[in-house]
Amino acid sequence: MGRYIIRRFLQAIPLLLLISIAMFLLLHALPGGPEAVLFNPHLSAAGRAALRARFGLDDSVPIQYIKWLGRSLTGDFGFSFATNEPVMTVIGRRFPATLELFSVALVVALVLAIVIGVVSALRQSSATDYVLMTLSYFGISMPIFLFGLFAQDIFGVQLHWLPVSGTQTLGYQLAPIDAFVDHLEHLIMPMSVLAISYIAGWSRYMRSSMIEVVHQDYMRTARAKGVSSTSLIFRHALRNAVIPLITVVAIDFGAVAGGAAITEGVFAWPGMGSLFIDELTRRDYPVLLGMLIISAVFVIFFNLLADILYAVMDPRIRYS
Amino acid sequence: MDISEDINARQVTPNEEIEPFLELTPELAQKRRSQTRIIFDRFVRNKAAIVGAIGLIFLFTMCFLGPTLTGHNDPNQQNVSSVSATLASASWQHPFGTDNVGRDVLARVMAGGQVSLLVGLTSMLMAIILGVGIGAFAGYYGGIIDNVLMRFTDIILSVPIYLLLFVLSASFTDGTPKSIIILIAVFGWTYAARLVRSEFLTLKEREFVLAARTIGVKNFRMMFRHILPNALGPIIVNATLLVSNNIILESVLSYFGFGIKPPDSSWGNLVYDGQGLFDVDPKLVFIPGLMIFFTVLCLNLVGDGLRDALDPYMTER
Amino acid sequence: MGENLLEVQDLKTYFKTKSGYVRAVDGVNFSIKPGEKVAIVGESGCGKSVTSLSIMRLVAQPPGEYAGGSILFDEQDLLTVPESTMRSIRGAQIGMIFQDPMTCLNPTMSVGKQISEGLRIHLKLSEPEARRRAISLLEQVGIPAAGERVDAYPHQFSGGMRQRVMIAMALACNPKLLIADEPTTALDVTVQAQIIELIGAVCSEFGTALILITHDLGVVAGVADRVIVMYAGKVIEEASTEELFANPRHPYTIGLLASVPRLDESRQGELKTIEGAPPDLLKPPTGCPFMPRCYFARSICRTMPPLDPYAGDMSHRKACWVDVSDPKEQAYAERRRQERVAAQKAAIEAASVAAGTGSESVTTA
């Protein structure tokens, strides 16, 4: 199994290299060329010359790439146009908010998706099944930004139950407990919207996987041994049915960057996604490119993780 | 056969009847239907798919024929003559009301619909052509070509599509539908390519390919006249879902201000426009938003219906 | 109840479909003594598998229904006991092995765990005890290096080995009855003999009664004491193995045995078949189901014959109005057979005349 992991890991490296080349080319393809992308528009001529030397823009393209690659590997993506801070600092500052939003949403979504999927599968063709599957169908048909807007209108504007944006109510100095509760209130809506959009797809997947497993011959063998229904569902069926779902979850989570941009944009949640949107309007290319690379690495990493998880969970892959 | 000649017959009692044989004849085979007919019948039996199809027909009719039929054909005609003319609620004259400068919302929705639907469809067609072509070459030839093409596909798939599209639309597009269509198509072919490639990989080992080769069919013709028709099923399903995917993509881009820009309108940028007035008049956001939702829902229903109708192993569920 | 371990009385298992009820098992009667090895034979679709699943009450309730009869096991009617009782019987009192070992084992659980599961549920063994017993069971069914293989996964075994694992699993708790539903059909011919021998040997050793379901008469001859022949959901003959093979008394059994190719037959001769097809179980005929294909049939066959002893011999019963050993009946059957052959020839001639090829091309039989 260790060999399998190493093998997959090694397969990912050429892909990462290729992505870096693609990003590098993108750098040069954007209007204005690398200077527009890397140099702060407010630089003086002397500053420009210094930066030209630093980035090696007078060197040949392959040399530029090597230097650029070296810088990227050390995390040096340049400096933000807007704040002149190192890109990594700017991004890093926003990271915790995104992590919080997405990890909570992921856990909630995973648990609920499994529950809903299993319940629907066990009560196939019943009223419960139809209701749940219809709701999830609506869920996958609704673009997430719309869903967010609807939620904001109903729960925020009309009912005044929850705040519609940000991580806390500004302008008040609250006691720690109250601040925490206030923060939670702000977290609920974006987290729920995100979770529900994941649940919609995952629960359908779980349901079909569960239905397929329940009809397998080995379930009948287990029943013939006198295994109880609870044990049948949890020890036998679920164990097999959840495997494909976990890989889908891992891959979906890898694509977090895209989803983050949209959700955080709608709810003004101060994470990496909304940073991306803000910097986009400001054409702050160093930050944008840095984020593109980081998110690509993220995607590849989680795809790799999905494969590894699959091998861990399915002995047929592990020992073949 | 004379009974009197049969020795054993003398031992049979005279009034013994001989039981006639009860032939069990198999039921007559069903009248043969063509493959297209079979698929069509299965699709039609699926009520959800039919609802989706009717919904789509209604949407297309409404957006493309609506302006001429209903007379709401000027989305840009402003009317700031009086306070009540702006942000009006639904009335006979303006079934969807008016926006903050008195423009008829219904007209804007229909005009926006034309763009959104067109963008979705056209970008799908371009993406499918690209994807099928790339996938066919990769799957048919295999080897180096396959490797290179698939690495290329992997690169595009690894960067989150929204981030990429955001950056590229901000830098390269000018807000016209044409540029958005091209942008979405250029990055939307990857799933179709993967799909077609795997179909080709399995199909090219089949015997009908070998048979065609022995009569001298050359590669290009083999790919597109022989193998491709057999892979059409999943391609059609993917195409339908791609339209809904692209409509969502365009609407997200426009919602953040990077996609279709005025004077062109799409449902996405109608939402963008309406966002500023969200507190005052949420319907400016909801009406185009619900149109998007409804379109995507119908497309998904039709796509799933097609998938079920084309699936040869579909069992009763 | 007496000395019988299992008594199936007038069992009816139907399946509800859109077009009506399929009568898969339609009034089946038989009994099994402790330690006895009984084979149930019949063609595909005759109801033998459904009978065995009914004994274990494993038939999926919709669309299946237990429409009548009783299954008496150990003083209890298995069709009416609560599910919790049934669960304690499955695996512990009655074990079952299925046809396809490839798909019948859980791919994500080790073989040892799957065997131990029954031991821990029914015998309440602790995990290390169960594991030890699982290893010894694997040895008994002939799996080499059982101590290491116990942690292996099903996909790491060959088909024959997997079936041995299934046998170990089914016999783990020493049940009184083992039901083997076509255990060798999915295996290579060379492995089939080994598995059948193994099943016979372990059943003899532990005194387990055996119901062996198969359509392969060769398998029957190797291991069964008694044979039950089923057709269209009903039992139509039952006898000890030697008696059935030597003196079949039901026209279907006769046809069945005649269709087995023999080494002493001429190699150029045609294989014998039973013409026709089994009846549609949605609308089964009211009388004997074999009637349309039977040369011995008479008008009385429109009523289903009871399963009665032949010539007073309680151990050999048949469900047939006709005494097939009677020369008069045999003559009658022969006449009908010749009529049919003649009718077929005439039909072929008529068809070829209609096709314009003329009567010269009609080949002689």
Image (spheres, rainbow, N blue to C red):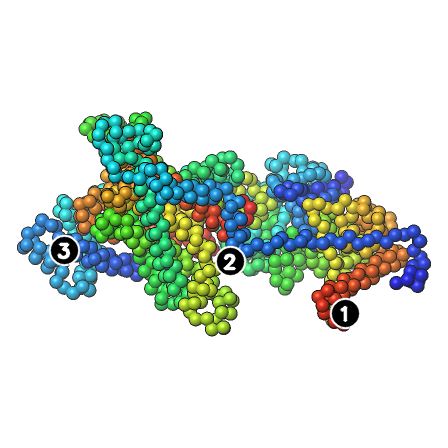
- Residue with the mark numbered 1: C359
Q: Secondary structure at mark 2?
A: helix
Q: Amino acid at mark 1?
A: Ser
Between residue B47 and residue C158, name the one nearer to us.
Answer: B47
Q: Chain of mark 3?
A: A
**Pointers 1 and 2 in contact (CB under 8 A)?**
no
Q: Position of residue B172 (x, y in %)?
A: 22, 52
Same chain shared by disc 3 and disc 1: no
Residue at position x 36%, y 67% in the image = B144
Residue at position x 89%, y 58% in the image = C327
Q: Mark 3 and mark 1: span between their CA atoms?
A: 96 Å
- Residue with the mark numbered 3: A35
Q: Secondary structure at mark 1?
A: helix
Q: Amino acid at mark 2?
A: Gln
Circle number at residue A142: none
**Pointers 3 and 1 in contact (CB under 8 A)?**
no
Q: Amino acid at mark 3?
A: Glu
- Residue with the mark numbered 2: C156
Q: Residues within 10 Å of mark 1 (few under 14, many from 20)?
A: some
Same chain shared by disc 2 and disc 3: no
Quadrant into which the C terminus of chain C falls: bottom right
Q: Secondary structure at mark 3?
A: helix
Q: Position of residue C213 (x, y in %)?
A: 68, 52
Residue at position x 87%, y 50% in the image = C311
Query: Looking at the image, is mark 1 or mark 2 earlier in the sequence?
Result: 2
Give the left or right position of residue B41, taking residue B173 as reference. Answer: right
Q: Position of residue B103 (x, y in %)?
A: 26, 35
Q: Mark 2 and mark 3: span between their CA atoms?
A: 60 Å
Q: Chain of mark 1?
A: C
Q: Chain of mark 2?
A: C
Visible in this render: residue C347? yes
